[in-house]
Amino acid sequence: MQMIAWILCIWLAALVGIWARVSYSKAMRTMTRFNCDTDTSPDAFNSLVAPDDAPAEYRGDPSVWPKVTIIAPGRNEGHVLRDTLSSLCELDYPDYQVIFVDDQSTDNTAAICRELAARYPHLRVLHHHQSPPKDWGGKVWAIQQAVDEIDGELVLFTDSDIRHHPQSLRKMVQLQHHRNIDLLSLLPRMETGGLIEQSVMLMAQHALLTLAPLYKSNDPQNPSPLTGGAYMLFRTRAYNSIGGHAAIHRQLVEDLALGTQARAMGLTVFTVGTRELLSGRMYEGLRDTFCGLKKNAYAGLRCNPIIAFLTTLVIMLGGVLVPVYLILAIMAIVLAPVPAWAVALMLALLVNILFFAHFERLRRITCQKPGSPLFMPLGMLFCIGVLAASMWDYYIRGGSVWSGRVYAHREVDLHATILTGEAKGVSEPGLAEPGLATPQHSAELSP
């Protein structure tokens, strides 16, 4: 028993070091430095993208606010669309148009679109009827139907389940102009339901910001910037120069692929987070969360079974079992009150303090509701189940499933470019891959 106690002490001491390092890492220390809200100045960011490097005409606000085309695809989002699409149409910005792409919705989306199009003259609705070709992702294909309608110096791609603050577009255009950015991405504040769902999303945010902390993402030397599909504001000429969405048509994780493609082509890519300007509930309940996360879980690990096994082992030993260590140490010292178990108890208590304090800090930064860090072990166990299901889809079902569509891994690229750092699709600026001209689509524009 003494030997077991000392082995456990060694492991717990290692966990103390790991969670102390995670809690006070540069990623955590700098996270709030890349946060933009209504009162944030463009000069506020501790960034490698400095306005001093920009020509004088880019300093401050633009003399004339450029026209912006907003493209928002949506499939069966009728439960939130009236609220989210209205927020897009009520932005405090002088010159913009909104194009909503109804991607073969079967709910009440069409009726809501008719209602909103009658209310907002700058809203155009494209009813998209074609299923995507075998080698195209569904969202990318839907967006492609609207790219011919881009009319302005800037184009914003956003999701239809996101709520926009009235000042969001003005703040982002101001920041983009002031810092001379070609692609500006804004990460939204995530809204969640129950405490288990919140803990799962905290785990997902922790993993994402560990793999791609913003201070590294915004380094021009980093080939794999973190860009989110919820908000991607391009200069139109920059978007065209990388071949647009056609250049990454096989990428299921299209937002990361676009950022990687833009960085590879020498464009300036910059990402910030927000607590006020953008918000949305990515998934509705645990079932939807499970289905949504498993779409990209195994792809995020490069579809590598060894990495998946090691990831599962790390999550289990370093997260799920953290409170179990404390319980076992308490039971052991009651049954055998020896110094080794006393040391194990103190180390287990310290590991738990560091573990839950880290996620409480992350909860505050990401504006989640109180209480969710206490459920982190269950949330991590949930994530292990997500990864197992994602691997099942990949090997047994032959692909990934999302929004009622099955994407075979032989037809689309499921690998997340944030880990590979590979830019795929175009060989020269402004030239898309051969045979990837803008597709002819059957659609209706209204009004």
Image (tube, rainbow, N blue to C red):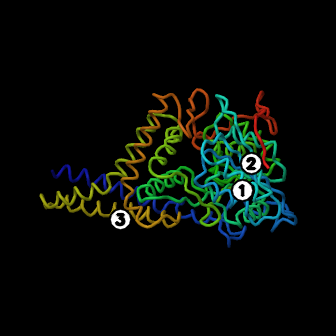
The local secondary structure at tag 1 comes to helix
- Tags 3 and 2 in contact by the CB under 8 Å rule? no
Q: Type of residue at label 3?
A: Ile
The local secondary structure at tag 3 comes to helix
Q: Is residue 65 above or below residue 251?
A: below
Q: Residue at x 61, y 31 (%)?
A: 412
Q: Tell me how far mark 3 sits from mark 2, CA to CA.
A: 51 Å
Position of 90 compared to 389: left or right?
A: right
Q: Which residue is mark 3?
A: 353
The percent coordinates of residue 214 (x first, y second) are: 60, 56
Q: Type of residue at label 1?
A: Leu
Q: Type of residue at label 2?
A: Val
Q: How busy is the neighbourhood of tag 3: few (under 14 within 10 Å), some, or many (20 plus)? A: some
Q: Tell me how far mark 2 sits from mark 1, CA to CA.
A: 9 Å
The percent coordinates of residue 156 (x first, y second) are: 74, 52
- Tags 2 and 1 in contact by the CB under 8 Å rule? yes
Q: Which mark is residue 116?
A: 1
Q: Which residue is mark 2?
A: 125
The percent coordinates of residue 254 (x first, y second) are: 64, 42
